[in-house]
Image (cartoon, grey):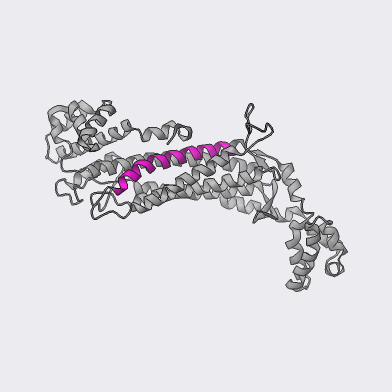
């Protein structure tokens, strides 16, 4: 991923030096287990750690060897041998390249998941704080982009909190699912490696053993992992899109923080554009775009082919780095979001009281008017207001068929904004708990 959309801690997980360090640890822990069961000398296992346990691998040298061997793991093992010396013959006993590559990828994806889970926690904290701040700040709810009935801005943020809470649970499950280790040999039969070696390495690397591997860890695990990242990206876009709509000039109920010295347009000095949330929308598309290749990686030939390899070399780093950046950026947007309650109130009243139409409809039915007739009465008074021709309550009071069923005071009571917000506490308790 390009530096513009990257954060150092996540990038470090995917750097070559990190990858080679994980490869070494897998190989060295395997040697410990082999020594424990008497396959290789104990002194050799100790020498491997002593001679290479703290070295910085020469990435350029490994690349140089790979240009000749055309094989990345062999190039690494050759370079490792340059540190270790004669004991290097005991490294990679009975395991195959995919054992190292797949177990390493599991470690990297688990580490990436832990960072992403922390990102979501920070976002959840920001959402909860702002939701509680605006718990009872009224704002118009919209369906199809059209004014519907009142909600609160806090409820909008509470919905996002609930969604990202589900995303967090999904990611926890995906992290657990992807955290498996396979050291089962060329076609997964353990013909040349004892299963106890796999169990030892799994424990040391913070993984569980893969119940049945072929030459690879089954890619349904990876498919689910990247699909989960895609769902999280969609949640990011959902909230980003809401903020973008609320920042539109005609709405302006909330907007991204505009810092001193910031410029919105090279041509128009007045512009304050929702650039961060627009950026988040684009980044979400990138992450989702990596889901289909992960799904297509599931179907490999027989015990293994490498059609998945080139895909994962790209989507592993790019999806996690991009999502990490996006979650952090969204958290910043929410923390600094500028909210305009006065504009929310103005927009609530833009349609001259039409937002209370359902209450009038229901009240008429409670007075014995058929639903069809009640709908007709309410709509015929609503449409002039929609066209800017009068006030809804005034027109209803002047309609003899409406006033026959509902008195002026009863009609006025139906225009109480608090009626729509009476269950906000109940919803918040469902989302955030009793506190």
Residue 118 seen in the figure:
no
Residue at image coords 65%, 39%: 255
* Residue nearer the viewer, 43 or 88: 88
Residue at image coords 17%, 49%: 190
Is residue 31 in the magenta section? Answer: no
Compared to 105, does 412 lie above or below? below
Residue 217 seen in the figure:
yes
Q: In the rendered structure, which segment of residues is drawn in magenta?
A: 307-334
Q: Position of residue 291 (x, y in %)?
A: 41, 50
Q: Position of residue 421 (x, y in %)?
A: 69, 53
* Relative horizontal placement of residue 81, taking residue 326 as reference (left or right): left
* Relative horizontal placement of residue 141, taking residue 353 as reference (left or right): left
Quadrant for residue 336, please give it: top right
Report the number of numbered marks.
0
* Residue nearer the viewer, 368 or 226: 226
Q: Main secondary structure of the magenta part?
A: helix
* Relative horizontal placement of residue 364, taking residue 34 as reference (left or right): right
Residue at image coords 85%, 61%: 395
Q: Position of residue 333 (x, y in %)?
A: 58, 38
Q: Residue furthest front?
A: 267
Compared to 33, does 85 lie above or below? above
Residue at image coords 41%, 42%: 113
Is residue 327 in the magenta section? Answer: yes
Q: Quadrant of the N terminus?
A: top left
Q: Position of residue 167 (x, y in %)?
A: 48, 49
């Amino acid at each position: 991923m390009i530096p513009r959309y990257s954060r150092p801690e996540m990038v470090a997980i995917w750097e070559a030096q990190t990858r080679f360090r994980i490869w070494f640890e897998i190989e060295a822990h395997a040697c410990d287990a082999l020594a424990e069961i008497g396959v290789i000398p104990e002194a050799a296992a100790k020498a491997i750690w002593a001679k290479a346990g703290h070295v910085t691998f020469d990435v350029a040298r490994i690349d140089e060897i790979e240009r000749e061997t055309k094989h990345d793991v062999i190039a690494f093992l050759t370079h490792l041998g340059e540190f270790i010396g004669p004991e290097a013959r005991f490294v990679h006993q009975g395991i195959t390249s995919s054992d190292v590559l797949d177990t390493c990828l599991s470690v990297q994806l688990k580490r990436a998941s832990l960072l992403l889970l922390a990102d979501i926690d920070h976002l959840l904290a920001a959402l909860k704080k702002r939701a509680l701040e605006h718990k009872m700040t009224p704002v118009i709810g919209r369906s199809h982009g059209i004014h519907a009935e009142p909600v609160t801005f806090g409820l909008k943020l509470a919905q996002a909190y609930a969604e990202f809470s589900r995303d967090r649970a999904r990611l926890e499950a995906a992290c657990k699912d992807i955290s498996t280790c396979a050291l089962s040999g060329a076609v997964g039969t353990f013909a040349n490696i004892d299963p106890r070696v796999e169990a030892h390495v799994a424990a040391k690397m913070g993984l569980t053993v893969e119940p049945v591997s072929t030459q690879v860890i089954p890619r349904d695990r990876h498919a689910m992992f990247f699909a989960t990242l895609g769902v999280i990206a969609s949640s990011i876009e959902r909230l980003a899109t809401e903020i973008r709509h609320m920042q539109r000039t005609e709405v302006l109920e909330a907007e991204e923080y505009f810092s001193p010295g910031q410029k919105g347009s090279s041509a128009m000095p007045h512009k304050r554009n929702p650039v961060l949330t627009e950026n988040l929308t684009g980044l979400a598309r990138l992450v989702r775009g990596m889901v289909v290749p992960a799904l297509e990686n599931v179907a490999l030939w027989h015990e293994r082919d490498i059609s998945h390899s080139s895909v994962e070399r790209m989507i592993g780093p790019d999806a996690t780095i991009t999502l990490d950046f996006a979650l952090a950026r969204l958290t910043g947007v929410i923390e600094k979001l500028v909210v305009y309650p006065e504009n929310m109130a103005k927009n609530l009243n833009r349609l001259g009281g039409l937002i209370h139409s359902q209450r009038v409809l229901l009240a008429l039915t409670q007075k014995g008017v058929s639903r069809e007739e009640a709908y007709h009465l309410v709509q015929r008074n609503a449409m002039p207001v929609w066209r800017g021709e009068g006030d809804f309550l005034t027109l209803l009071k002047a309609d003899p068929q409406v006033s026959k069923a509902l008195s002026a005071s009863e009609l006025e009571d139906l225009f109480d904004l608090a009626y729509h917000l009476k269950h906000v506490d109940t919803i918040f308790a469902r989302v955030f708990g009793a506190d």
